[in-house]
Amino acid sequence: MITNRTYTVEPWSVRETALNLDLLAQSESVFALSNGHVGWRGNLDEGEPHGLPGTYLNGVYETHPLPYAEAGYGYPESGRTVINVTNGKLLRLLVDDEPFDLRYGRLRKHERTLDLRRGVLERSCEWTSPAGSTVRVRSTRLVSLTQRAIAAVEYEVEPVDGRTRVVIQSELVANESLPEPDGDPRAAKALKSPLEPEEQHALGSRLRLVHRTRASGLRVAVAADHVVDGPEQTTTSSESSADVARLTITSVLEPGQRLRVHKTVAHGWSGTRSRPAMSDQVEAALAAAAHSGWDGLLADQRAYLDDFWARADVEVHGDEEIQQAVRFGLFHVLQAGARAERRAIPAKGLTGSGYDGHAFWDTEMFVLPVLTYTEPRAVAEALRWRQDTLPAARDRAAQLGLRGAAFPWRTVEGSEGSAYWPAGTAAFHVNADIAHAAVRYVAATGDTDFERDTGLELLVETARLWRSLGHHDHHGVFHIDGVTGPDEYSAVADDNTYTNLMARANLLAAADVCERHPDEAALLGVDDEESATWRDAAEAVHVPYNAEVGVHEQNAGSTRYQRWDFAGTRADQYPLMLHFPYFDLYRKQVVKQADLVLAMYTCGSWFDATCDEEQIARNFAYYEPLTVRDSSLSACCQAVIAAQTGHLRLAYDYVAEAALMDLADLEHNTRDGLHIASLAGTWMALVAGFGGTRRHGDTVRFAPRLPEKFRRLAFRLQFRGRCLSVEIEAGEATYTLLTGSPLTIGHHGTEVAVNGDGPVTRAIPAPKRRPTPEQPPHRRPNAHGSPGIEA
């Protein structure tokens, strides 16, 4: 529950009804607009006050050195950090010669609304200057989902109580002053004024700046055009310098008169195109946007989102906060990937500079599942980006003495950006995560062209990595040693169950896809002998199990480790990594985030084939008291398995934690950007948790159950060219095929045929009652209704 009520709870919007300067940076992330190519943080139109100015272009970064106190073979030599590019949001306002600055004068009213159906950020405020002049300001901002280079804003000023002289300065500004970062000072130095000027232009209502990054050599072009509507005496003038292009609009307004500006901004970047070509590119984008006009951009945005919500909406009856949060999450996940188009989907999307703008395994295992069933085209593009980075991944594997491709743990453009081996390179599971995403996409869409042209190569090169990384012992058992699984508190361990099972699936999928496309596989050098070795390794992979305790081990031997002293750990000592040495975490039983529990979801078919329901419940009960959730990725995973094992109230509390991660700023770092994977995890927790949705080969199965707080849960999925509606109530589930040919699905273990003739309803069996597992002291999820993690 959002106790400070920074944002009102509404089903289709996020509304801020007062301006709290202490929460400004958080709101800038929440109100960020993006399309996956361009990102505008939700800064105030006038630029100040601000928390963190931010305009981002996906893939634009600067390099900086990564020196080490002690050199080590294989360490990355340089880091890459997303940069704040030329800011086109700025519309500075002067009222009777006084800057419109909300820190001064009297702010009578201030409201901002993120409209999730229209895809716009709206703002209205009323302000009295220190000299006593009162004005109303309204603005509407969008980043276009249909014209990926374009963002636009409508800005309107109206006097309230008398004749008022107003000046609007619409600007493009490069190399803005940013707050000093808390992290690496070497990076801060490298990123100070990273853009070198190449071109400046201001003529009439048109502005343009072209810059190039100092070290990475990327060229950035930003241009703006304006339509001004005001009294007859309104005048304009333009000017430019190396880092600023400005259009100044001056008018005298009588009560009832308004000065309105429509500003359209075009963005582009390239590592290879010339300066004239980049200038032409953004000018052409402006011309296309002008053809649509402001009203056309708004209409196109609404139409795009109407289509998205028709196939992606999740309805939650019984909890207004979770209803708002899941739509907020879906909106930002869509924004992160909709027009990324062969670029990464960073962990923060384009909402902030957290994690240096890097992409991790979060993309494939949390974000892409949502997009697979709601916006599959974006998934194909994200995986084609991974394919484009294969040369760097092959080089990295060769550097490590391995075959195939070793994809980076964190990256902007394909090279490894992690300077810490145990939580970076040793987390080889990212390779299987990418393969898993490719298999999931093909299974859900039937896109055989993608499988042949992209999926095959990704699967082959990752399979080669696993075959060279692992080894058979003298009993023929296949082991993968010295790796880090999802739980980063158990690093460089042997036979991580999640890694081994994901590698197993990767190896089998690679062998299968080579059988389906033998000619293309042969071009990659795959023969029958190689694919046979993949199958042999997969079938012999070791999955550690402690028969005495009766649970699967997260890593080989992990259940014999000493348990962490939870009773002696204070509430203010979480997250543990900030208060205890890693070596101590690594040798104790303490779990940062769901690992073995995540494996039971992602590799559920293996557990279904080898275990009964009681084994899964025992595993979950064992790891719950060890898992401290020092990662935003954990709660949604635990929600899924809690629901599967019948702990519906616990699952509900975990869903709420994932859902409110950013709206309630549970980890106190939303200021750096949103947790896109946790937002995606809200969908996962509802659809895979309470919906019980699982992909099984080329079919989909459901085992739905609702917590007491929910009266109804409804969602839609895109699957194999069909749109399927699922509606769940306390005692029954109804399946309706909205579009497409007949489909056979699973419902709690029985087959159900759905077609276009109408809905099919089935009863939901009651879950088996089991004792609710304990959580570590101070880390039990809050009973939904109060914020954060229990202290």
Image (cartoon, rainbow, N blue to C red):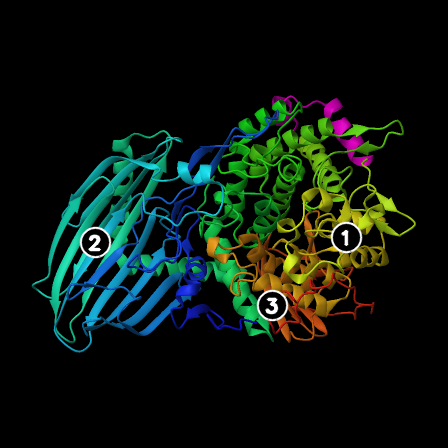
For label 1, the residue is 564
Residue closer to the observer: 172 or 139 = 172
Residue 765, by quadrant, is bottom right
Q: Earlier in the sequence, mark 3 or mark 2?
A: 2
Q: Is residue 385 above or below residue 662?
A: above
Per the image, label 1 sits on a secondary structure element best described as loop
| Quadrant of the snapshot with the C terminus | bottom right
In whole angstroms, how far apart are the C-alphas of marks 3 and 2?
44 Å
Judge left or right: residue 159 versus residue 502: left
> Which contiguous range is marked in magenta?
518-540
The residue at 21%/39% (across/down) is 200
The residue at 38%/69% (across/down) is 19
Residue 478, by quadrant, is top right
528 drawn magenta = yes
Residue 482, by quadrant, is top right
In whole angstroms, how far apart are the C-alphas of marks 2 and 1?
61 Å
For label 2, the residue is 226
| x and y percentages locating residue 403 in the rendered image | 66, 24
In whole angstroms, how far apart are the C-alphas of marks 3 and 1?
41 Å
Q: Is residue 249 above or below residue 137?
A: above
For label 3, the residue is 714
Judge left or right: residue 563 versus residue 259: right
Per the image, label 3 sits on a secondary structure element best described as strand
Q: Is residue 725 visible?
A: no
Judge left or right: residue 549 versus residue 754: right
Q: Main secondary structure of the magenta part?
A: helix
Residue type for callout 2: His
Q: Residues within 10 Å of mark 1 (few under 14, many from 20)?
A: some
Per the image, label 2 sits on a secondary structure element best described as strand
